[in-house]
Amino acid sequence: MNVWTALCLLAGSVSLIGFALHSPPDESARIILTSENDTVQIQGVFENTAELTGTLTYALDVVREGAGGTSSSAQSGTFETEPGQVDSLSTSRVNVSEGDRLEVDLTIELNGERVARASIDCVYPDCHSRELK
């Protein structure tokens, strides 16, 4: 094996390790942020692309940290879904100032097992994960 082949194999191994550690986000769970003045509206959405039926549960957790202190909210509930259906789960609003850190986590479960998850961790106003309108 020459040096070039060894380097290519090593690079491929590193890429595979990186892929395993940083897998692409699950597209069925989405967090939509809408910014207006000093308020961010946070909406959790589930798009049933996995042919799931029945009752699912969701949890939408929001934490804002900044010069004004820390605030948090947690919303959860159940919803019925069908294959191909898009469900708007919960909407929350948080007041923000420039430089505030915003952490949002949306988890969807079926019978206690996670089936989808989306998260955002950003510093306002640079919150561009998933969708920012």
Image (tube, rainbow, N blue to C red):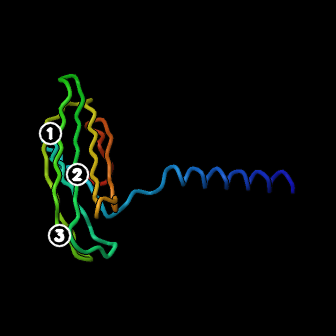
| Residue 131 pos. (x, y %) | 28, 54
Q: CA distance from mark 2 to mark 3?
A: 15 Å
Instruction: Tell whether label 3 touches label 2 (CB within 8 Å).
Output: no
- Image position, residue 68 (x, y; %): 17, 23
Give the labeled residue for mark 2.
Answer: 59
**Circle 1 residue:** 94
Residue 110 quadrant: bottom left
Q: CA distance from mark 1 to mark 2?
A: 17 Å
Horizontal and vertical percent for residue 34? Answer: 18, 49
Location of residue 100 with respect to 33 vertically, above or below: above
Say which quarter of the image contains residue 77: bottom left
54 to 26, vertically: above or below: below
Please tell me which residue is depicted at 32% across the width and 64% down the height of the picture.
28
How many neighbours does mark 2 have within 10 angstroms: few (below 14), some (14-19), or many (20 or more)? Answer: some
Tell me whether circle 1 and circle 2 mark residues in contact (CB < 8 Å).
no
- Kindly report which numbered mark, 1 or 2, lies closer to the viewer in this rendering: 2
Q: Which residue is mark 3?
A: 80
- Is residue 37 left or right of 84 when viewed as pictured? left
Indicate the amino acid at tag 3: Glu
Marks 3,1: beta carbons within 8 A: no
